[in-house]
Structure formats: structure tokens, C-alpha cells
Amino acid sequence: MRVGIVQFPGTNCDFDTWEAVRSVSGLEPSWLSYQTDSVREIDAVILPGGFSYGDYLRTGAMAAQTPVMKAIRKFAQEGHPVLGICNGFQILVETGLLPGALLINASRSFICEDSPVVSLTSRTPFTSIIPEGTRITLPIAHQEGRYYLPEDKLRNIEASGQVVFRYANNPNGSIHDIAGVSNPEGNVVGLMPHPERRIRHSSSPPDGLLFFESLLISLRNRMFQRTAPDLPLLK
């Protein structure tokens, strides 16, 4: 299963993401340039973290106008999995694929620390093996990660199950402790924490690996359902 990893000028978590994808047998990472206008022969797309275009204008604003994002918009609308991590989340919001805005942290400062988050749904391709209510710990590293949405729209995404993760300690002041959201269909997910930085057994559990293992199982299930719709889904 080929996973496209997008590189923008200023992306700096691309190689971490490459290694995270490659660590799961069955997933094959592939580079996607910001200049390409096609994502053919790709099964899923990940927008890594970093500082695309130096965060000029607004975080993610310039990257959202690139040719690859036009192709990814169509890719997402066709139901394929798309994940935005940190700056990738900001880009997906700027592109309109995800609701809300990412504002400067309540502390007005850059935050770099481990942060516990709680999973709220297993219906996305990136959380399919993470039971609801599971608490995991992932690194965060951002200055503009405070999620915001007006109250009326916030009620809508809460009711429709689009809130994917909440912070247990809310380090940046995000409304309703929101750390990650999805589109209504659930195939597009954005989150501020970095799962790609927590994939190896070291001093902490490799909680980030769950995202990429979930993706593999979800992609295989999609393939099985296309070829043999009566077969049971993998778990």
C-alpha cells in the first residue's frame, strides 16, 4: 500500500514520517512534491509537520494554494485517507478539508513537550485499532496549535463525532480540549501531536505506531471490500 508524503518548502518532519510509514510492513512510503498535480497510484496521503513557506501570511496558507493540494482535495473527496500532522493539520484547515482554525497558543509561546491525549473514535482510517477512550501520549511542538471553532459549528462537529482526540491537559488552550478532528466522512484527519515521533520502543510506549498500523488495516479492508464485499473485515 503506497502512502504519499508531501514535501513543501519548509517541511521538516518528512523523513520522520517516512520512517514511521516504512516501519509498518505492508506500507510503502512515496514522496509527493508540492508541485505535482497528481496523486495517482497512491492509497493514502500524509501531510507532515514543519514550517511550510516559513509560516508566512498564516500557518499553512501558502501551502494550501499549491498544485498538490488541489489534487489532494479531489483525492479526499473520493474517500481516500488523508492525514495532516501539526503543520499538515494547519494546511488541511486552510484548504477547507477540515473545519476550524489553528490560533497562536494561549501562552503566546512555542510549546515542545509530551502531551497525553484521549481517543474519541475508531471510525477513521488512522484510529481504527485505537479503542474509544484510550489515553496515549504523543509529542507536541507548535506555536499556533490552539484549535478554535465558533460555538454553533463546534456543536455540529461534536454531535457528528468529528472530534478525534482531546488533550488530557490542554497545553495550548484549544477550545473543548480538541487535539484532532476529522471531516464528516471520517477519511480526512488532522491533529497537532506528532505520532511519527513515537514509533519505537525506547523510554516511552510507541503509541504513535497505532496510527500507521490502523492505516494499513483500513487500506486492506478497503481493498477487500472492493474485491470481495462479503468477506469479514480485518481487526
Image (cartoon, rainbow, N blue to C red):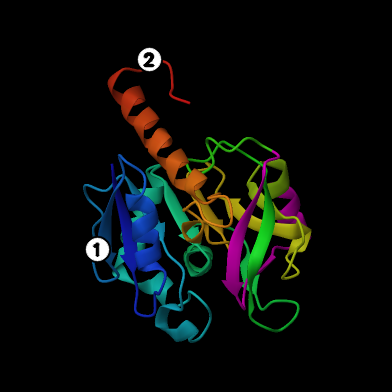
Q: Residues within 10 Å of mark 2 (few under 14, many from 20)?
A: few
Task: Name the residue that disc number 2 marks.
Answer: 231
Task: Name the residue that disc number 1 marks.
Answer: 37
For image coordinates 56% across by 49% down, the residue present is 207
- What is the span of residues highlighted in magenta in the rendered image? 133-156
Asked if marks 1 and 2 touch (Cβ < 8 Å), the reply is: no
Q: Is residue 28 above or below residue 146?
A: above
Q: Earlier in the sequence, mark 1 or mark 2?
A: 1
Q: Position of residue 64 (x, y in %)?
A: 42, 70
For image coordinates 44% across by 46% down, the residue present is 212
Quarter of the figure that contains the N terminus: top left
Inspect the image, locate mark 2, and give the three-letter code of the amino acid beneath it.
Leu
Q: Position of residue 61 (x, y in %)?
A: 48, 76
Q: Secondary structure at mark 1?
A: loop
96 or 191, nearer to the observer: 191
Q: Is residue 174 visible?
A: yes
